[in-house]
Amino acid sequence: MSSHDHKESLTARHSATDDDKQELAHFNKRLTQLEKRLSLIEGKKARPIEKPEMSKAAKEMVETLLSRLSPMDVDGCRLTRIGRAFDGGYIMAPPKPYEKVAYSLGINRDVSWDLEMVRHGCKVYQYDHTIDDLPHQHEGFNYKKQGITASHQIDERMTCLKHELQNNGHQDIDNILLKMDIEGDEWEVLADLEMNELQKFSQILVELHDLHKVYKLFWYRKALAGLNKLFKTHQAVHVHGNNNTALRIIGGYAVPPVLEVTFLRRELFQFSPCSRTFPNKLDQPNNPSFAEHQLGSFQFTNPAKK
């Protein structure tokens, strides 16, 4: 092939790539619009819950969703807190020698958990599109200025966990540690991942946002679909209410709008009924100026199984 032909071939490839990106961006925008329209249609057709704090229907929705988050004890394993004091620390099982890869989704100004993972021998892959650079550099960090969302919503600012697992050569690696605080996009990520992809993660430490929307049908369906899938592969073992936001009364229950949850992969651990209450000695308030959310045992039974 002549140099002229080679240049033309490269130009054609770049044009095709640009066309694909534009087509994907258009598709993502259209899909987002359709989701919003569906939410509005369901809101009009479904009878709105006028007093969610007193509603029996809202009570059942709370019980169904939070039954997937009710923690159990971990037999033969003492959970530990890793990361800085107050906001930024995470409760987890002590990392094992075979857990060599960690994903940290959402950085902001804190890499204390990431640094601890490096000290445990992990390579840490970090994602946050809201900062220009990391607050602290380390050779064990691999940072991208991109956010994480669902595969159908990716653009120049956002990527998805599916693609990043492949891009980083982790499609055949198990026992990955996942820390996720991405301001509501966690629901898109959980809905997007397949069962075999969820099973790659030995531990998932996630901050779940917007739980006070549990009585809103469209949000509830998306959140429940993601948690039902995760419940098949992972068990919640610790919960902590983020006390930067006030508890909401929904269906007679005090619901934290933002909940930090630790999930462990079922096949790696043995579990027994929970004997703890939350918060406990492992926890610290996200905001030390406010009172902690008293969640009790946080045990909920799915009303469909009563």
Image (cartoon, rainbow, N blue to C red):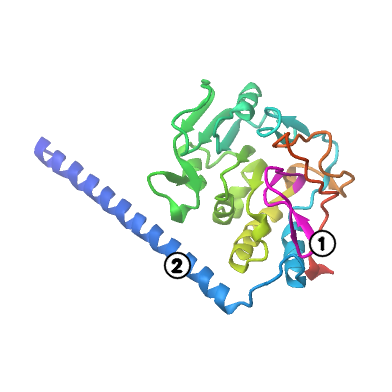
Q: Which residue is most to the front? A: 289
In the image, 278: left or right of 199?
Answer: right
Q: Is residue 302 left or right of residue 104?
A: right
**Three-letter code for the amino acid on which mark 2 is drawn:** Leu
Pointer 1 or 2: first along the chain: 2
**Is 103 rendered above or below residue 158?**
above
Q: Which residue occupies 59% across, 54% down?
A: 187
Name above or below for residue 113 compared with residue 8.
Answer: above
User: Which residue was labeled with disc 2?
Assistant: 34
Task: Please tell me whether residue 218 belongs to the stretch shown in magenta.
Answer: no
Give 156 or 125, whichever is nearer the viewer. 156
Q: Which percent across, then down, holds residue 11?
A: 18, 44
**In terms of image quadrants, where is residue 24?**
bottom left
In magenta segment, residue 254: yes
Question: What amino acid type should be assigned to the residue bearing mark 1?
Answer: Thr
The residue carrying mark 1 is 301
Q: Which residues are magenta?
A: 236-261
Quadrant of the snapshot with the N terminus: top left
How many marks can you see? 2
| SS under mark 1 | loop
Of residues 98 and 296, the one nearer the viewer is 296
Q: For numbered disc 2, what is the local secondary structure?
A: helix
Q: Residue at x 61, y 77 (%)?
A: 46
Q: Residue at x 19, y 47 (%)?
A: 12
Q: Nearer the viewer, residue 143 or 120?
A: 143
At a point 69% along the width and 51% down the height, the residue shown is 233
C-alpha separation, residue under disc 1 versus residue under disc 2: 34 Å
Q: Residue 96: give x, y in percent of width and height.
A: 71, 30
